[in-house]
Amino acid sequence: MATAAVSSATASSTSAYGLDFQSLLKIILTQLTYQDPLKPVDNFEFVSQLAQFSQLQQSQTLNDQITSLIATQSATQATGLLGRTVDFTSGQSTLSGVVQAIALSSGTPAITIKTADGQSLSGIAISDITQVR
C-alpha cells in the first residue's frame, strides 16, 4: 500500500504545468545550444533557472497533494453525517432532516436528506448545512 502511495506521488511530481522534468531539461539544453557565443549565460543565471524549474515542479506537486487532501477531508466529513439530524438551507427556507446517503461526484460530496414529512431531498452540499444535532 505504501508503495502505491509513493509511486503516485512520484508520478505527479514529474509533471509541472504539462511538462515533465526531462522536457524542462531539454528546454535548458536547447537554450544553451543556441545561445550567442559572445553573450553566454553565466553559471549563476543557469543554476537560478534550474532552481526555478525545480521550485515550479515542487509547487505543482504540493498543489496536487493539497487538492487530494481537501477531497478526502470532504468525503470523511460527509460520511460522519450519516444518520445524523441536520438543519440546512434550501432556497430561502431552513429545513431539518436525517442524512440518509452520501454521493461522491468528482470528489465533491452530495448529501441526501429525509425530512420530517417524508420528503427525500438529494444533492444537498455540506456548505448548506447550518446545524448538526
Image (spheres, helix red, strand yellow):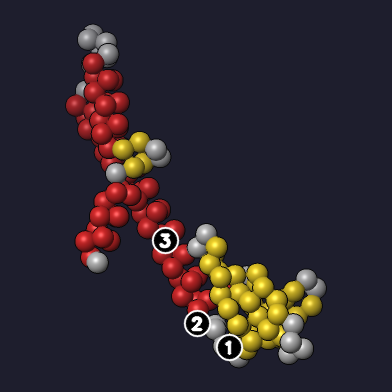
Asked whether disc 1 touches disc 3, contact meaning CB atoms under 8 Å apart, the reply is no
Residue 31, image x, y percentages? 28, 20
Relative to 52, is 77 on the left or the right? right
Q: Residues within 10 Å of mark 1 (few under 14, many from 20)?
A: few
Residue at the (58%, 88%) spot, across then down: 84
Query: Does residue 100 appear anywhere in the picture?
Result: yes
Please name the residue that numbered disc 1 is placed on.
84
Distance between the Cα atoms at labels 1 and 3? 26 Å
Please name the residue that numbered disc 2 is placed on.
80
Asked whether disc 1 touches disc 2, contact meaning CB atoms under 8 Å apart, the reply is yes
Tell me which amino acid carries mark 2: Gly
Residue at the (25%, 30%) spot, across then down: 25
Quadrant into which the N terminus falls: bottom left
Q: To which quarter of the image does residue 21 belong?
A: top left
Tell me which amino acid carries mark 1: Arg
SS at circle 3: helix
Farthest residue toward the right?
A: 92
Farthest residue toward the left?
A: 43
Relative to 7, is 70 on the left or the right? right
Distance between the Cα atoms at labels 2 and 3? 19 Å
**Above or below 111: residue 60:** above
Residue at the (50%, 63%) spot, across then down: 107
Relative to 79, is 9 on the left or the right? left
Residue 7, image x, y percentages? 25, 55
Image disc number at residue 4: none
**Above or below 109: residue 100:** below
Looking at the picture, tell me which residue is in the foreground, 8 or 67. 8
Image disc number at residue 68: 3
Looking at the picture, tell me which residue is in the foreground, 99 or 89. 99
